[in-house]
Image: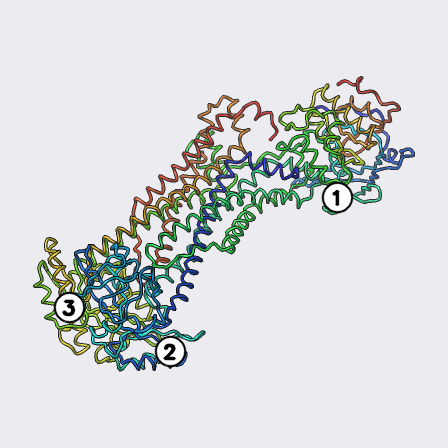
Amino acid sequence: MRALQRKLLRDLWAQRSQVLAIAAVVATGICLLFAARSTFGSLQHTQDEYYEQGRFADVFASIKRAPWWVAERAAELDGVAQAQARVVVAVNLDVADMEEPSRGLLISLPDRGEPVLNRVLLDSGRWVDPLRDDEAILSLKFAEAHGLEVGDHVVAVINGRRKRLEAVGIGQSPEYVYAISGGDLFPDPRRFGVLWMARRPLASAFDMEGGFNDLSLRLLPDVQPQGVIAELDRLLEPYGGLGAIPRSQQTSHWYLTNELTQLESTGYVVPLLFLTVAAFLLNVVLVRLVAAQREQIAALKALGYSNRAIGLHYVQWGLGVSALGAALGLLGGIWMSRSWLATYETYFSFPRLIHQMSWNDFAQAAGVSVVASMVGALGAVRAAVRLAPAEAMRPAPPATYRQTALERLAEWLQASVAWRIILRNLARRPVRSLLSVVGIAFAGATLVLGSSLVSSITELAAVLFDRMQRQDVMVTFNEPASSSSAFELTSLPGVRSMEPIRTVPARLRSGARSRQVGVLGMVADPRLWRVLDSERGAVAMPAEGLMLSSMLAEILGVRAGDRVEMEVLEGRRPVLGVDVASVVDDYVGASAYMEIEALRRLLGEQGTTSGAVLTIDPLAESELYAALKRTPRVAGVALRSATIENFETFLSDNIGSMMFANLLFAFVIAFGVIYNTARISLAERARELASLRVLGFRRSEISGILLGELGLLTAAGIPLGFGLGVLFVLWAVRAFETELYRIPYVFDTRTFVISAVAVVGSMVVSALVVRRRLHELDLVAVLKSRE
Amino acid sequence: MSAGPAPGSSQPADAVAGSGGAAPPVFRVRDLRKVYEMGEVQVHALRGVDLEILAGEMLVLLGPSGSGKSTLLNILGGLDLPTSGSVEYGERRLDGADEALLTRFRREHVGFVFQFYNLIPSLTARENVALVTEIARYPMRPEEALTMVRLQDRLDHFPSQLSGGEQQRVAIARAIAKRPQVLLCDEPTGALDVETGIVVLEALERVNRELGTATVVITHNAAIADFADRVLSMANGELVGERRNETRRPLSEIHW
């Protein structure tokens, strides 16, 4: 090994604690970067493979009922490669281990062979016999959630008749990777399942003989879906087409894509933050190292080492640190992406999740750490190169100090000499002091971010479950019914109050923009299911016209007072002009609301009801569930308690580990910054502090000088961290905003307390470590050696 | 720090030049000037120095601190550039040379010994010498160089495990390992006591004798001057005297 390389290794070893502190920051950044990239790559790869293997469709359409030949016509449309018609029906499922009904989707399988699109991949068991009406393939997550295996039975309420179905197989489909039932925030595999059945029995039970109500298309390569959708809608319109949607709006795909997008963006932002801090620390430590080694540098130059060789030497120091960090970070990243994927596996249903670790991701992580170390090393290398050998031979001139504004403050406060030393030191290197403060603030901000998000999510839950959805049960009918059907519900056991709901599938259009929604008709002043504005609280329905979620208003590009076109997708399918009466800044969904009577008037109908929300007597719960399971008209039953339970499971599954990771990351940054700042102050001023000791200062007094400096930096960093943290949170709240929900920003003093305590904690730990070194200061040796 | 004794003669600097014998000069310096800008003040470190250094000679440069001897040495060694005047090393001009040429010159032709040794503390004696042998063209082995300064038993000691005199001898070994034509020593005994200083000078003398390396020793200690072939005195940035010792006094007789 070359002598200069030996020097490098020994220098690194001599400064191992600082090296480790910086490497930990690099490692955290690289770990997050790699985990996000690798998870992203794995999910995307898995998705691609699965979609290909499962022949996932490009266009999806629901129809009231169309005859078979329409499917053949659809297949002949320009740009269409394949079409597949199915019968899809929402039913209630009765599973032995649950009192309340589950929601189920029955999907028909072709009479012969396997589906050409949206295939079902069998996990176990066998294919259904096309002639049997009592066999089904269960979706894997649903089967797992209930502990069902091949040979077990599920009861489906088909047209009011309880039908016992045998699970002959268990499988998955790319159509239900994220199997979520309408109105839910998270998938609940216990309460939502997909069952694939033979077509014939299903069609005859639902009056679909010779027809279908669901159509999927696969397009030819490079064909855009818009044109095909327009053609398809025209074709399906006479048969009650509900409007075709492209794959991008298909529920499961939409969630998966959303998750991937978030992974991709957060995969860069957060690691970048860490690597910036790492570059800063490297810079500070290396600049100090070069200053301390100025005579060594001069000697090397005198011996004939070129500027390049010497510059490279210090670059390698930085590279060494980042290589260590990158190695640790990659190990952590592999582990972390595994655990992330495991979490995804509980929410997403994949036949096999391919954990992909591409060389590309490794190279990217390594490259980024190299860049960070280069950026960090740059200043120091420049200093080393610029050092004129003849000049470097002489000891460095005493540092220049001057009185500053800070100092006048000290004078005014009649501060002690010790305090003046502290203030002058900070003022002498204003940029470094400032960067240290910013670094500490970053750590604090990370904590504010982490704990605020927890507060925000908790607040969202409170808004959802305590203030918005105050019903205990939501019942949906399988098709629009008379108002008496809703009132009949009040006579069921345990029902205390009821509010009817009218949902109308429609396409809202404004200019070129359009969106397919269910327009929600609600009573004028709802008590149970309310609409909340983030500023105004519960809002009443306008007497006439639509009330839009601000999200939907944004999508359509409309404001209150504008007029939109409402193309109704059921019944007589009128196309109506409706005024936007108001826009509501609500927390969930991209919804359109209307007063129920106004909606009925608009459609020219009387008392039509699609479902109802109920409050119930908890003691009569079982009885009510049993009654609901027997009611043929009831297609779905959503329980608030189940939703809350599901939400809480999600929180406890994810928030705990998220908080822990957050604390760890923040500590890594805080310790990295504070400890290095302290070590450098110590190195720079060992001589000065030793002189003070010789003059009779006590250990505690010189510790006070050094630690007072740290304390001051920390004290300045904490409030800055609060401010920065709030900015982070506001950014994150925006970034996490989806059509599904908006996370409210909550000002929670606890988040600031957590942040401050953790930062102070890191400072105390660094201070203790440095104080030990301070006590070990060898007075004679320090004074003898030439600074 | 008190100045050394004033030189006896006050020969003009011009007369010093060209006073060499038959041996060809290694360095030829003409009207060398160096001005440092220190804010608004100009410091004239060298005010027109003319000088020749002959192959194989042992030259002592005597003068009080601030007389310009270190500046001269730094320019000779390619560590610094003059403000005006010329420096020829053999056929090469060093004044106005670029960084790459100076680096090559230092790497191949000149050895440095500093007052404070300037060893790399994280490297052993052998490794400190290897720093040079790894980049020079015709180096000796590090062990060989260390043997010349009688440190063959301290090869694997770190600087912190060596005495001041031993550290300086490592520095000498490091300087001579490349077999330089010139050895430039800036106050090599400045930080040492008499006995240790003598050991270090012995090492320098031995190198000079056995390898024939022209050696320039800067000092403000007039007692050391007696072991040189030639003694030049400097004051205020000028050469103010030259003395030739017909016989070099053995080191055993030198005290200070």
Position above or below: A109 against B103? below
Residues packed near mark 1 inside 10 Å, few (<14), some (14 to 19) or many (20 plus): some
Residue A662 coordinates in the image, percent (x, y): 38, 46
Q: Nearer the viewer, residue A38 or A70?
A: A70
User: Of residues A434 and A403, which is closer to you in this image?
Assistant: A434
The numbered disc on residue A424 is none
Which mark, by number, is residue A160?
A: 3
Horizontal side of A563 relative to B213 (left or right) equals left
* Mark 2 touches mark 1? (CB < 8 Å): no
Asked which secondary structure carries label 3, the reply is loop
How much space separates mark 2 and mark 1, taking CA atoms?
A: 74 Å
Residue B163 in view, yes or no: yes
B248, A736: nearer the viewer = A736
Q: Where is residue A537 in the image (x, y as percent from the top left)?
A: 22, 59
Secondary element at tag 2? helix
Mark 3 is on which residue type? Answer: Gly
Do the residues indicated by labels 2 and 1 lie within the same chain of the protein?
A: no
Mark 1 and mark 3: Cα distance apart in space: 97 Å
Lateral position of residue A36 relative to residue A542, left or right: right
**Mark identifier at residue A228:** 2
- Label 1 sits on residue: B104
Amino acid type of the residue tagged 2 in the rendering: Val
How was the colour assigned to the protein in this rendering?
Answer: rainbow
Q: In this view, does B225 lie to the left or right of A584?
A: right
Determine the CA span between mark 3 and mark 2.
Answer: 37 Å
Which residue: 47% across, 42% down? A24
Picture layout, residue A477 above or below residue B88: below
Q: How crowded is mark 2: few (under 14 residues within 10 Å), some or many (20 or more)?
A: many
The structure residue drawn at horizontal position 11% and vertical position 65%, both measured from the top left corner, is: A489
Which residue occupies the foreground of this view, A140 or A682? A140
Protein chain holding label 3: A
